[in-house]
Image (cartoon, rainbow, N blue to C red):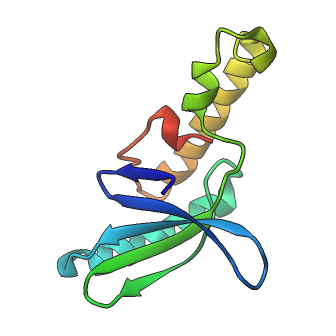
């Protein structure tokens, strides 16, 4: 398990055919939200095509009548929370003002891309910024 939030659990998986690591989010199934979830994934994919700062979705689907799943790009470089926790160490980079502004700009560009498709990120936090 690499993460958990209000919307589900995220696990790290390795594709047996390609060897590529992916993040797989499992979301509790709610029948009345299936159509909306499919639309949101489609909009998310379009936003990811607009910005390199939006995680890519490889595929998504349903597991029986219990869960929806989303297979996403895995960002192996860690998250912003880890980088911020090392902020006291100048060699880690967060003491660098230019780097902080670069990260801020990248997050804003990613959010702008998803907002342009009517999506709202409901869980903006350092752990969700890689």
State whether residue 78 is above or below residue 92: below
Q: Is residue 42 visible?
A: no
**In-front residue for pair 37/80:** 80
State whether residue 39 is above or below residue 100: below
The residue at 46%/51% (across/down) is 3
Left or right of residue 20: residue 67: left
Picture quarter with the C terminus: top right
Left or right of residue 128: residue 91: right
State whether residue 73 is above or below residue 66: above
User: Residue 115 placed where, x, y %?
Assistant: 47, 49
**In-front residue for pair 32/79:** 79
Which image quadrant for residue 93?
Answer: top right
Residue with the most extreme bottom position: 64
State whether residue 1 is above or below residue 128: below
**In-front residue for pair 43/29:** 29
**In-front residue for pair 6/106:** 6
Left or right of residue 45: residue 7: left
The residue at 72%/26% (across/down) is 102
The residue at 48%/59% (across/down) is 117
Left or right of residue 64: residue 121: right
User: Residue 126 placed where, x, y %?
Assistant: 51, 33
User: Residue 44 placed where, x, y %?
Assistant: 52, 63
Mark count: 0
Which image quadrant for residue 29?
Answer: bottom left
Which image quadrant for residue 28?
Answer: bottom left
User: Residue 14 placed where, x, y %?
Assistant: 67, 72
Q: Is residue 3 visible?
A: yes
């Amino acid at each position: 398990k690499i993460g958990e939030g209000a919307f589900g659990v995220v696990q790290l998986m390795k594709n047996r055919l390609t060897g590529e690591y992916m993040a797989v989010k499992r979301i509790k199934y709610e029948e009345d939200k299936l159509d909306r979830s499919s639309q949101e994934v489609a909009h998310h994919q379009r936003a990811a095509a607009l910005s390199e700062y939006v995680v890519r979705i490889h595929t998504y689907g349903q597991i029986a009548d219990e869960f929806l799943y989303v297979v996403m790009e895995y960002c192996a470089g860690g998250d912003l929370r880890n980088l911020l926790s090392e902020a006291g160490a100048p060699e880690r980079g967060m003491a660098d003002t230019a780097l902080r502004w670069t990260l801020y700009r990248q997050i804003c560009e990613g959010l702008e891309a998803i907002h342009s498709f009517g999506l709202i990120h409901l869980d903006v936090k350092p752990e969700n910024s890689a």
